[in-house]
Image: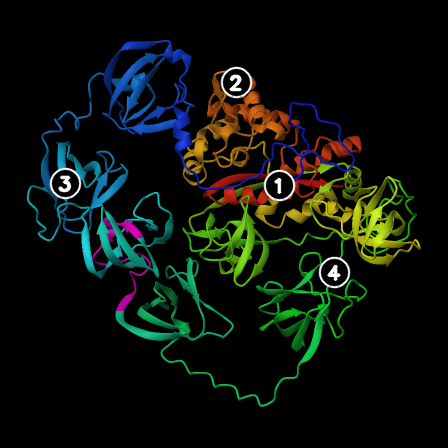
Amino acid sequence: MRRTNVLHTKPEQPRMPGKVVKKAMIPTFCFAVLSTGAFHEAVYAEQPNSVQSSVKSKVTTKYVNISSGSLNLRKTPSTKAAIVTSLAKGTAVTVYSEANGWAKVKANGKDGYVSTSFLSAANSDSFTKQSTTQTVTKYVNIASGSLNLRENASTGSKVIGSLKKGSTVTVYSEAKGWAKVKAGSKIGYVSTSFLTSKDSNSNSGSSGFTNQSITTPVTKYVNVSSGSLNMRNSASTSASIIVKLAKGTSVKVYSITGGWAKVEAYGKTGYVSSAFLGEKSQSTNNDSSLSTQKITTKYVNIKASSKLNVRKSTSTSSAIITKLTNGTEVKVISESKGWAKIRVNGQQGFVSSEFLVSKISSPKPPPPKTETPKTVTKYINVKLGSSLNMRTAASTKASVLLKLARGVEVTVYSEANGWAKIQVYGKTGYVSSDFLTATKPVAGSDSNTIKNPVPGSNTGSGSNTSPGSNTGSGSTTAPGSNTGSGSGSSGNNGSNQSKPTVVEKYVNVIYGSSLNMRAAASANADVISKLARGTLVTVLSEANGWSQVTANGKTGYVSSQYLSDTAPFNPNTTGPSIEKVYESYNISLADMVKIEMASNPQTDKKYDTYIRSDALTLTSPTSGIVNGPSWNVRGGAGAEYWNVGQVKAKDTLQILATVKGKDGFDWYKVAYNKTWVNASPNDVSYYVNPKNFLGTTANSLQFLKLSVTTELDAKEVNNRVLSGKGILQGLAATFITAGEKYGINEMYLIAHALLETSNGRSELANGVQVNGKKVYNMYGIGAYDADAINSGAQFAYNSGWFTPEDAIIGGAQFIANGYINAGQDTLYKMRWNPRAAAANGRATHQYATDIGWAAKQVKQMYNLYSLIDSYKLVLEIPQYK
C-alpha cells in the first residue's frame, strides 16, 4: 500500500524520481481473537494525582445503596472513564479514600472509583442483613417447565439460570416474596412461592445443575422462552458458537456435567446449558396449528434443475435452513394448511406439501451409446507467462480445476457456446474455445492472435492485454532522455475504462458459526483466522475445492463450498440506515484524470512493458544491458504510451519478445519486476470515477462521511467488535466519546486502532516507558519506520497520552486536524482531493499514491460493520461536470 507522509511531524526527505514514500498511518481494518491480559494489566497502571493526594489513613467498609439497576465501578474518577465492573445493591466495598465526590474502592477483587453519593455506612439490602451462616436447604416445587433464577429480586431482572422441579437450593435469606439462593455455582433470586422444605420430585438429583452419566444417548428438546440456544465448542460461555438451536429442537444427550450437556444436533456435536433442555418438545407458534400424524416417508417432486426450500417456519418469508433436490427422501411428521413439517439429513423444517409425493418414478435410463464421440487434439494458446483456467462447468463462475500453461496439448470432446469440453492430465473440464488452437503455438512468441475471448476473462493472471497496449504513432524517445513525447492521447488516455480483475465473494456458513481460514489447503492445516458469516473476501485462486483468499488483512485458504457470490441473509440483523448526499465539483472526469496522471499515481498491478531496441546492448537473444543514463519503460510498443517506470545505465533486462512499432523501431517486450509502478490512464480513470463503486454497500463505503458519527451501541461494540482485542477490549465508550468530541466516525477510529495496534497487542498500544512515565499510542501517529517504537512513544509523551483513553481521544484530535476538519472527510476525498484539484489544477494533499487505496479499505470496513446489528451510514457521492 502506497502512502505519502503528510501526517508526520518530521519534514520529508527529498523525493527521488519514481520513488514513493511510505506512510506510517493507514486507515484500514483487520481482525483477530487475542488475549485480554494486556488490557487488565494496563487498567490499574496509574491513578490520578487528585485522588492520591487525599488518601485517608483509615480504611472503611461501606455498602452500595441504589434504588434500582447497578452501580458502575470505573477505572478513573470520571463518568467518561472505562467501566471495570457493575456492583449490585448491598455490595460491600472497601473504601481507601474519598475526594471530589468520588471514592477509591475495592469490590469483588477489583479496584476502581464510584460516586460517593451511592455509598452508605449501613447495608440497606434486606437480603444481606441476615447472617449468611443461617442457611437452609429447600427444593424447587413447580408443576411444569422451569423456575427462573434471576440476578435481582424483580421479575424484570435478568434471568441467569433455570431450575427444574426438585432442584436443591441453599437459601440465604427471604424477604418480600423473594429468596436469595445458591443453585450449583450460581447465586441469585427466586420466588419463595415455588420453594418447599421437602423434595416432591424423588427422581431429581441434589441440584438443578446435576452431573449425569448417560450410558445410552437420550433425546431431549430445547426449552427456551424466546430466542435460541447456543451450542458451543466446549462447556464454557466463552467458547465459540457452532450453531443456534430453536425452541423444540430435538438433541441427543451424551452426558451432563457442571450444568453443561454434551449433545448432538444437525449432525454436529457440542455443548449446551442443561437448564434449557426438557423431556418433552414445547410447541411453537410456527407449528401449533399442524395436526399430528403418523410419520410417513415421501419424496421431493420438482424440476430436475430446481431446488425445494426447507424453511424454519410455515411462511415463504421464513429463513431457509437447507435446499433439497428432486427425488430426496424426507420423513413427514405432520401436514396442515399446505405445509409439511419434515425431517431430513438430521434437520427439521417446513416445505410446501404440493412438492411432495408418496412415490417417485425412476427415470428411464438413457439408451446405451454405441458410438464413441469424436475427439480432436488442440493446444492452449494464451499470452506468454499467463495460464488458462479449466473449470468444472461451462461458466466463468464455476470452480477452477487446473491452470493450463501456453502450449499444453488437450483432448477436445465437444464445443458449444464458446466453451470446449476437454481432457488433460487425467481430468475433464471446460475452457474457453477462444484460447485453443489446432497448431502448437511457437515458444517465446505472441504472434498467434486470440480473438473475441469469453466475457469475464477466462485466463489467469497476466493473460489480458494491458490497457493502451495497441501500437500507435508518436515521436521517439532519444537515448538517455528521461521523458518521451506523447501524453497518452493516441488510444490510451483512459477513456475506455477496464475494471480490475478482482474476484470477491462472501462467507456463507450456517448462522452463528464461522469459517476457518487455514495456513494451507488442507483440513489439517493450522487455523489462522475465523471468518464470520457475511465476511467479504478477495479470492486469489481456486483449486481442488479450496480457495486462497485475503480477508481482514490476512491471507489463507478456505473451503470453496462456503463462499457465495452474494451476501447471505442474517435474520437477526436490521441492517444499516443509509443516507446519500451529493457534492459537485467544477471539473470534468477527463480533466481530473489528466491532473492525476501528472503526479505519477502508483499501482501494484503488473503490466506488459516495452523499451525501444536501441536502449539495450544485447548480451544474449533474451537479455540486454541498458546503455545511456536512463530510459523510460512504456506500457506499449511506442513513445505515445504512458511511462510505467525507468531503468538506468547497466541495468540488465530480460527480453520476452520483439515487436515492430508504428514509429519504425523495434521494441523489446521486457520483464520489469517492480512492486510499484506508474498506473495506466485507464486504471486511474477507473478508480477516480465514483460510478464504478456504487453497486454494493461494501464498495460505496469509500464515500462514507467520516465526519458523521455512526450512532453505535457501546455494549454491542464491546461484545462483538472489541472482545478479545487486547488493551482495546471494553473501550467502545472511549472511542464513541472521541468520535463525538471531534466529529469523527467511531467505527473508523476503531478500525484504524485495530490495524495500528495489531488488534490491541502492539508494544506501543500496551505502554512504553518514556522519562519514567508509561505512554500509549493507539493510531501509530509519529511512529516512523526506522524506529517506530521510540518515535511513536516520544510523540505520545509530548502529546500527554499517559492512559489508553488519552491516546484514543488525543489521537482522534490529531486525525481530525489532519484531514477530517480540512474537508477531506471520506476515504475517496483523502485519496483524490477533487476540490483542491479543481481549484489549483494539480494534485495536492493526498493521503496515498496507490490508485486503489480508497477501494482497498472498504472490504475490512464492511466486515467490521457486518459484526453489529444496526448502524447509520451517511454517504457523500462525488459528481463531476
Q: CA distance from mark 4 to mark 3?
A: 78 Å
Q: Specify which label sits upstream in the sequence, 2 or 4.
A: 4
Question: Which residues lie in the magenta part?
Answer: 271-292
Q: Specify which label sits upstream in the sequence, 4 or 1.
A: 4
Whether residue 625 is visible, yes or no, is yes
Q: Specify which label sits upstream in the sequence, 2 or 3.
A: 3
As shown in the figure, which amino acid type bears the numbered disc 4? Leu
Q: CA distance from mark 2 to mark 3?
A: 53 Å
Q: Residues within 10 Å of mark 3 (few under 14, many from 20)?
A: many
As shown in the figure, which amino acid type bears the numbered disc 1? Gln
Left-right relation of 141 to 675: left
Whether residue 530 is visible, yes or no, is no
Q: Secondary structure at mark 2?
A: loop
Q: CA distance from mark 3 to mark 1?
A: 57 Å
Say if mark 2 contacts mark 3, CB within 8 Å.
no
Left-right relation of 12 to 598: left
Q: Which residue is mark 4?
A: 384
